[in-house]
Image (cartoon, coloured by chain):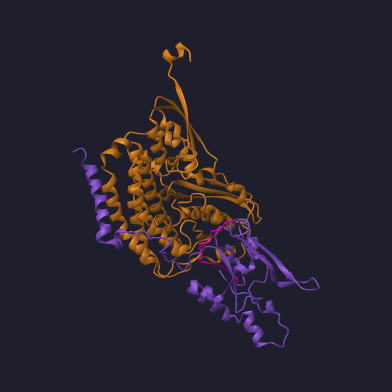
Chain colours: A orange, B purple
Amino acid sequence: MSETALHSQEPQLLEVSIGPQHPSTHGVFRMNVVLDGETIVKLKPVMGYLHRNHEQLAENMSYLASMPYTDRLDYICSMTNNFAYATAVEKLAGIDVPERAQYIRVLMAELTRLVNHTLLVGFLLNDLGAFFTPILYAFREREKILDFFEATAGSRMMCNYFRFGGLKSDLPAGGLEQVKKIVNNYSRFLDEFERLLTNNEILRSRCQNVGILSKELAVSASITGPMLRASGVNYDIRKVDKYSIYDRFEFKVPLGKVGDVYDRYYVRILEMRESIKILQQILKQMPEKGEIISAKGAAAGKSPRMWKPPAGDAYGRIESPKGELGFYLVSDGTPKPYRYHVRPPSFINITILEDMCLGYKVADAIIILGSVDIVLGEVDR
Amino acid sequence: MFGFGVLKGMSVTLWNFILSYIYPKKGITTVQYPEKKKEVEERFRNFPFLVYDGTPDNMRCVACDICAKECPPKCIYIIPEKDAQGRIQKKPATFDIDYAICMNCGICEEVCPFDAIFMDHEYELSEYDRLSDLMYPKEKLLKPVEHFMKIRPTDCGAIEAQRAAKGIKGRAAQVQSAPAATVKPAETQQNPPANA
């Protein structure tokens, strides 16, 4: 190195590749970071390591056969993935859903929201360096919900429980008691979790005013879900679109003020409390008995290879725990979709990572990524 | 006061630590796996197996190939049996399931009109060679209907009752009731029970 380079006032930039095998990138995700000292000057997310050709696969098989593949998109919340896909196909073919099935669907979606947000907070704390204590408390509670999923759908994570026009099977005997137990104990767990975390000085100093996402930027980048609401935009598809039977429940949409990592953490805690409220209302309102799949839907499930929806297109969307999850389907009247497109919330929320990370330290980039809440199965598809 | 939040958080960890000693039932939620096992739920599904009535010769599968065509990852391979003249018999000569490909979705079970394939509870299936050992042939897949009754009493009871109501007997029962007549077991199974 020449003498002039050593003593020059030009900052010497260092390019670091974080991932794809880094534990805090939540899967096989890579960030190419350009550093000036420890400050981030440039950040480039690199994805595609988990690409499985999901959309093309779905275009080459029957409509129902894609259902188990949607479980593998966002593998933490398979129930909501099923929900979105079933909504899209029902819109496409004009299938109605019976009352009881609607209630069970919303029940499953809200339980999934609890699972996702609890896990996210646990993983975020892991990224912060609270090594494995909060995540294990989160896993302990998630386990109870997964037990219920196993008893109902047959599988803990890859549920494959929704069918067009209803559900695969009714709740098992004693299923509702299991949910009641979960719902009654969950707010106590959240209190404990908050006592552990919310007012912790270390968490506050690491998270507050870090990775601020402005309202305008969030909207223009089409961010959805808790990320958007933490920036203070009141947009929840459960309220806006009122799909399924969400208009029957009373719940608030918690909003953040600053849009930093702490707000994103706290909005999720508050959302879980709202989910518990919805679950309590479901348990009160749910009809005791009833059909779980409509006649038209049952006909579609009898021979999935032969079932043809009418030609046309449909976009079905729901508020998944991570944001707006949508499926766009184009049918040409054959048993296979002509076009099958997924709008994954994780993928769109991660596009804004560089804008949030610029000017912060590397350790902050890790927690900003953690607060975005991505699942690589959904980002790469 | 700075540091109070941290102390408050520590009290939670301390309480959980103490709880695991005072109330092990509440405080310890893990299971010492290889020694102790958690019981799986009745609806738990893992990999498919084939059902037979009585003896393994009387399998319910008629090699109709519906499950193989509906299977999303296409892990089922069926070749129907042929007699001396080369006519296709309603029985599989080869029925292989590649457990390395199967994704445990349970669609084969839902679409089978003959109640022949169901999801098993077996989950300790690690093998040394994934190509040869995880390819399960007919002999390894066949299990008696009693096994199905044992693992999933509710589902099996409902399905068997439905079969009985429709007058579908297993092949074994039929052979015993009409030993002289030429047995065409597949004919009785033309009207499958509706299995949603």
Residue B97 picture location, percent across and down: 62, 62
Q: How many marks?
A: 0
- The magenta stretch spans residue B117: yes
Which part of the image, by quadrant, shows the C terminus of chain B? bottom right
Which part of the image, by quadrant, shows the N terminus of chain B? top left
A191 shown above or below B120: above
Residue A113 picture location, percent across and down: 40, 52
Task: Identify the image quadrant of residue A358.
Answer: top left
Q: Residue furthest left?
A: B1
- The magenta stretch spans residue A338: no
Q: Is residue A10 left or right of residue B51?
A: left
Residue in front for this viewpoint, A198 or B172: B172
Residue in front for this viewpoint, B125 or A68: B125
Question: What secondary structure is the magenta-colored segment mainly?
Answer: loop
Task: Identify the image quadrant of residue A172.
Answer: bottom left
Q: Which residue lies furthest to the top in this view?
A: A4
Q: What stretch is highlighted in magenta?
A: B116-128
A81 shown above or below A372: below
Residue in front for this viewpoint, A315 or B105: B105
Q: Which residue is drawn at 33% across and 39% down?
A: A262
Q: Is residue A213 visible?
A: no
Q: Is residue B93 left or right of residue B23?
A: right
